[in-house]
Amino acid sequence: MEDLKHKKVLIVEDELEIRNMIDRFLRKEGYTRIFCAASCQEALAICRADKPDIAILDVMLPDGDGFVLLTSIRRFSSMPVLFLSARGEDEDRLLGLGLGADDYMVKPFLPRELMLRLHIILRRVYAAPVVEQLPVFRLGAYIVDLEGAVVRSDQGEQALTAKEHALLVKLYHERGRIVTSDALCQAVWGDDYFGYENTLMVHIRRIREKIEAHPSSPEHLITVRGLGYKLIVTEG
Amino acid sequence: MDGAAHILRRFARTTIVISVFLLILNFILLGVWIFKGMNVEQSPYSLVQTVAEALQASSNGFTLKKEGEQLLEQNSAWVMLIDDKGKVIWNRDLPISLDRSYSLTEVAQFSRNYLMDYPVYVWEHAEGLVVVGFPKTSMAKYQFNVPVGWVKGLPFRIVVMVLGNAVLALLLSLLIGSRLIKSIKPLLHGIYSLAHEQDAYVEPKGVFSGLAQSINHTSLLLRQKDASLKARDEARSNWIAGISHDIRTPLSMVLGYASELEESPAVPAEQRQQAAIIRQQGEKLRSLVSDLNLVSMLEYDMQPLHTRRLRLSVLARQVASDFLNQGLDDRFMLDVDISDEQLQVKGDEKLLIRAITNLVQNSIHHNPEGCQIIVQTSASSDGRSCRIIVMDNGQGVAERDLPDLLKLPYSSARRRPVRNGHGLGLPMVARIAKAHQGQFSLISDEGQGMQAIIELPAGSCSEQT
């Protein structure tokens, strides 16, 4: 992972103070090869000469906007790009992402968030591809193996059906939080999910039969009346 | 165009009424005025009859009674009595130029016409024929000779004539009316367009060219006014967007360095806590700026709506879950109450969620001692609109202060300054409702809790399940 910090980062930002601040945070975070540009011209020159690995682009630049700059960069490079803009309207956000930006952040921003997002992009693009493994977690006496789609316990192994699996993935992803029945149905049946609420209840009951010691008084997969369900996982 | 046909109908009706009225008036005038002239003076026939009766044989010829003489003098008429042989046996004021004896042919001629240009009238008398002559050119004599068939057909002819007149009046009124309508039609069209806020242009020609020019001018004025209003709104909205944009850069630095200090192990704990306060206030400022921008965009119709069909129940559950997931304090009870899962509206999901969130936030904010909050969805009784109601049983707001809550803070329409919070939350909800062709209302009184109702036009509630 450490080699991600050796990636070349380009900051395109016309405000000197913001540029210095980002530069400072990047250095503190451990990045060493940082390039700065204050205009589209400069940015393009650096892109051609130094071939940065990732760019943080401002949208409003003195000699054009960041969207045009991204289009120009895309002609010869497919490096990841993160927009950092003072324009927060949906239109700008969608335009930026539509042009192929990897992320879009709105000023004012928290430096920690910028670093995290930058890191996520770098890892996704440059880190050795790891096969995404679905988690295995413990619920009381049961071990839920989402990768293998089974629930193990002293009594043996119980397979999860496709729908039960999809529901558990969604619930685990949002563990400790209420997931509305709408969101659960949408995760399993897609956008045309209306009318599956009763089916959802049936599936939830079957899941409980597999993961709860007392399915009628659940401890892990609990109902939040009127809203949805919550999966409580005690980590560790 | 409905208006034109209406006008034409009215016009034809009025014309027919007017012509019938004229016809009746003419008949009356004819009777009263014209025929009256004939009867003003005594008719010559009755005069000659009176004279004949007043003429009586006496010992020395004939004597004319007083009333006969008076009548003759009044009319400056003369009289003669012709016996069976044609000889004038008595006369009074007979002009000298006239003969004193007449043949049968002459008698037959003058009894119908004139005697030497004197209009004369005859009446039988015991001794012969009384002839009264009036001064020349004082009377006109006409003979009417009418076949009996013609007289019999007269009522029918009169009816036909009246009917013919009515039909002619109708046709003429339709002709004139339709020509009038033809020239009015463009004007009507222009006025209708103006009423519907469309551009109107009427070619100025004919009688109504002045009117047409006024309509064109009005249309131009309206367009100019509209454009200048739009420009002003846009300028205001852009101004606020510009300010909020300009605030973002310095705010970035405040947030950035404050959070760096907050996390720096080199800084003493107390100062780190102060940095945390700076960061939190900076974040508040950040949300205030973006709220301000959103409200201004909504206020001036600059906010684009990304509408799609949304189920109200989904929105209500989403908002409630978000609040609960963010760790709602135990003092508050948050529930949803869905009357009909299928209630749908066409709306912008983000904005509607924002509106409901603001309402729940409002209830939490104004009831620090805690309260029960219910997010309810329901349909109006006629099914035309859906409601999202956020109600709490908290301390409420005095009824007279409710209208103020929907006004923008610091605007002249707001009577009292904002008490706490930035005061943008409820005005934002009102504007989001308005942007969805809906409305927002508050029901509350001190100690009565608060009911906030967003009413939106229903987007075909009952679709297939």
Image: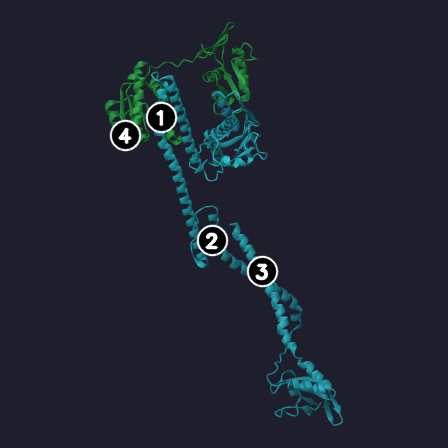
Looking at marks 1 and 2 on the same chain, the residue that comes earlier in the sequence is marked by 2
Circle 2 residue? B187
What's the amino acid at mark 4?
Cys
Circle 3 residue? B16
Q: Chain of mark 4?
A: A
For the residues bearing labels 3 and 1, Cβ distance under 8 angstroms: no
Q: Chain of mark 1?
A: B
Q: Are marks 4 and 1 on the same chain?
A: no
Q: Residues within 10 Å of mark 2 (few under 14, many from 20)?
A: many
Residue B326 image offset from top left, x and y in percent: 47, 21
Q: Residues within 10 Å of mark 3 (few under 14, many from 20)?
A: many
Disc 2 and disc 4: Cα gap in Å?
57 Å
Foreground mark, 4 or 1, reads 1
Looking at marks 3 and 1 on the same chain, the residue that comes earlier in the sequence is marked by 3
Circle 4 residue? A40
For the residues bearing labels 1 and 2, Cβ distance under 8 angstroms: no
Return the residue found at the far top: A154
Q: Which chain is represented by cyan in the image?
A: B
Q: Chain of mark 3?
A: B
Foreground mark, 3 or 4, reads 4
Total numbered circles: 4
Q: Is residue A132 left or right of residue B131?
A: left
Q: Which mark is residue B254?
A: 1
